[in-house]
Structure formats: C-alpha cells, structure tokens
Image: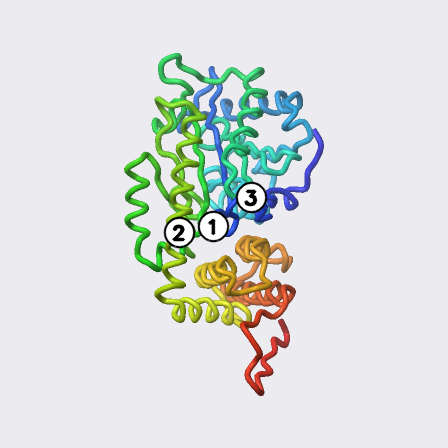
Amino acid sequence: MSQIEPLESGLSWLEASGAHADIVLSTRVRLARNLQGHAFGPRARVNDREAVLGHLRTTSERAQGLARGTLLELSEVDGRTRRILMERRLVSRDLLGDEQATPAKGAAVLLSDHDPLSVMVNEEDHLRIQSLVSGLRLQDAWAMVDRLDEELGHDLPFAYHPRFGYLTSCPTNVGTGLRASVLMHLPGLVLTKEIGRVLQGLSQVGLTFRGLYGEGSEVVGNFFQVSNQTTLGKSEEDLVDHLEQMVSRVIQYENDARQVLLRDARGVTEDKIWRAYGLLRYARNLSFEELMNLLSGVRLGVSLKLLPGLRVYSLNKIMIFTQAAHLEQAAGRDLPPMEGDTHRASYVRRILAAEGDVSDGPAPRGDGASDEGS
C-alpha cells in the first residue's frame, strides 16, 4: 500500500464538473458494513476494532480500488489533520470522537488514490464505504461504491441475514446499508418561502434533509443535504433511482423559484446579490456562518448570470478552505476565533481578487475603491 498525502485528498468534489453543479455541490453514496464474529456498534471492544482494522489492511492490498491507497490510523494523526479530513467530509464527527481526546483505538480512514473513494473504519459500523463526487452523479457514485463493496466482500465476511439483509449498528440502516445524499443549494425556494412545502414533500416520499455535515448539523447558507431514509425492503438500485428522481424535481422547483425572483423581485434580488459580493470582496472579518450566508447570495448571482466572471469552483473552494482547520493549516499555527475571522476574510478577498473585479456596468465617476492589503 502506497502513501497518499492526506492533505491532498478529498478535493475532487469541489470541481463543479458534474451535472447541475450550480445547484448540486456534491453527491455521496455510502454503504454500512460489519464483519461477522466481531461485536459492532457500542458493544465493540478494543480487540474487535483492532481485528477489523487488521482484516481491512490485508484485504485492501488485494482490492483494486484501494491497493494504492493510504490507511490512516486516526490516533496517530495530529488533531488539525483530523479536523481537515472532517471539513472535507472524508470522516465524520462520530469517527473522530471528542475533539479534545484521542480517537478510539482502531478508528481509521482508508483514502483511495482514486480520489472520490474512501472507507471509514470503526465508526458506528465496522466499515463505511463511500464515494463523494461533484454535481448530481448518483449513478456514478453508486457504481464506484458497488464495485469496491464487491471487491471487499470477496475476502471479508460481511454480517448478513437472509431475511433482513446487511446487519448494521443502527436499525434504520439494516437492509441495504445504503445512504445516498445530495448536497443542494436552494436559495430560491428559501427566498420564495416554498422550502417548507418542498421539504415536507420529501419526507412524505421517504427522504430526509440535514445540514452540510449530515446528521446533527445545522442548515447554513441555504445548503441542504437530501438523502434516503429507507434502507430495508428495496434494492440499492431502486433507492438510488428514487433519490435521483426526487432530486431532479427539487432542482426544477429551485429553478422555477429563481425565475420567480427575477420576474417579481428582480431589484431586491440583485441588491441582495451585489451586497453579498461587496461584503465578501472587502470585509476584514468574517465568521464562518456569516461567510456561508453571504456565499449563498453570490452563488445565486453566478447561477443567474448576474455576477459574470466568477467560477462555481472558486466558490466551492472558499466554502472548504475558510473552515477553521484549513485556515490554521495555511497559517501554520492555531488561530483564536477572532484571528480566524480575519484570516477567513483575507482568504476570501484574495480568491475573489484573483477572479477579477466583477462589474454590472461602468463604475460611477470617482469610484476608486481598492482592496489594499488583501
């Protein structure tokens, strides 16, 4: 097994290369698997977790999708790198445990040299096999995970019941063990006050929504993670197809809402967008929550072609590289919250300046605003 630099992993989903990338930031498909003969969930002991890790280490060297990957035992990785992996959505809070404590023995993440693929080891379940890709690409993400699941399943004795399917720590994952999710930006539905109706409709067809980091995280910046709730009684293909159909409807609802904003409230919408851009372009202090709310307005402006010249890829980078651990990595030291806000604003100014000044027409006479020191 070769070594991949962890800080170079988990970034391909920022590329804005998939379908509907202005609305759908990413698609993730994840499979929960446990090994026979070892306790899992809260009952797992140290020897169970270490045995699972040993099995995966051996098997991954024979699996084509992971043979050139890197297995990181999180207890041996510094705290900042662990937080960076979480900010990139490669690991979960549950896997890392208490931020001030060393992760549980056996907790690990296997990073594939094929960037979208990774495996969390000894989280809630023994294995969480996942792919994370740009835009709306549910079929591609599922195909990657399915291939790796089959490869690992040739050597690893997955816990499986002929009636119930794959056995998992949480009963809601029993069956396929599949969780597919799509991270969506839905400002049109929020601003037209239609978001409640749409989210209620999703819940009625077996879907749910969460924030940027999944279960337990809050919705900020009008970003919603839509995923399946049902895992039992349907095939993986059926679950993926159903989610894709429903997400496609939500994309249409969002596009319709954006057109309503342009038709009925164009002036207010343009003002909101340009105010957001102006604050991001020149602010000297930004909290992450404030950044995400302003970034929502700018993303909307780019999608509606009201802010020409900005790339969705750059906005995706801002969302990740302005989080606390990434800012500390760039600074080479820990940053107190207020200083982190200053570094965050500086990073945003630098990225937007590199994109070039955005203008909606000739500047008024005498307008010579500059961004010295950015």
Question: Disc 2, disc 1: CB below 8 Å?
Answer: yes
Q: Amino acid at mark 3?
A: Gly
Q: Secondary structure at mark 3?
A: loop
- Would residue 18 be found to the left or right of residue 238 on screen? right
- Extreme-front residue of the structure: 263
Q: Quadrant of the C terminus?
A: bottom right
Q: Mark 3 = which residue? A: 18
Drawn side of residue 87 relative to residue 173, left or right: right
Question: Quick one: label 2, few (<14), some, or many (20+) residues within 10 Å?
Answer: many
Mark 2 or 1, nearer chain start: 1
Residue wearing tag 2: 254
Q: Is residue 2 above or below residue 306?
A: above
Residue in view at x 58 percent, y 80 percent: 369
From this viewpoint, is residue 36 visible? yes
Q: Position of residue 79 (x, y in %)?
A: 56, 47
Q: Secondary structure at mark 2?
A: helix
Q: How dense is the environment of label 1, judged by Cα within 10 Å: few (below 14), some, or many (20 and up)?
A: many
Mark 1 sits on what residue? 23
In primary-sequence order, the first of circles 3 and 2 is 3
**Residue found 58% across the figure and 16% down from its top:** 155
Mark 3 touching mark 1, by CB under 8 A? no
Left/right placement of residue 69 relative to residue 100 reads right
Q: Residue at x 66, y 24 (%)?
A: 64
Residue 107 seen from this side: no
Q: Earlier in the sequence, mark 3 or mark 1?
A: 3
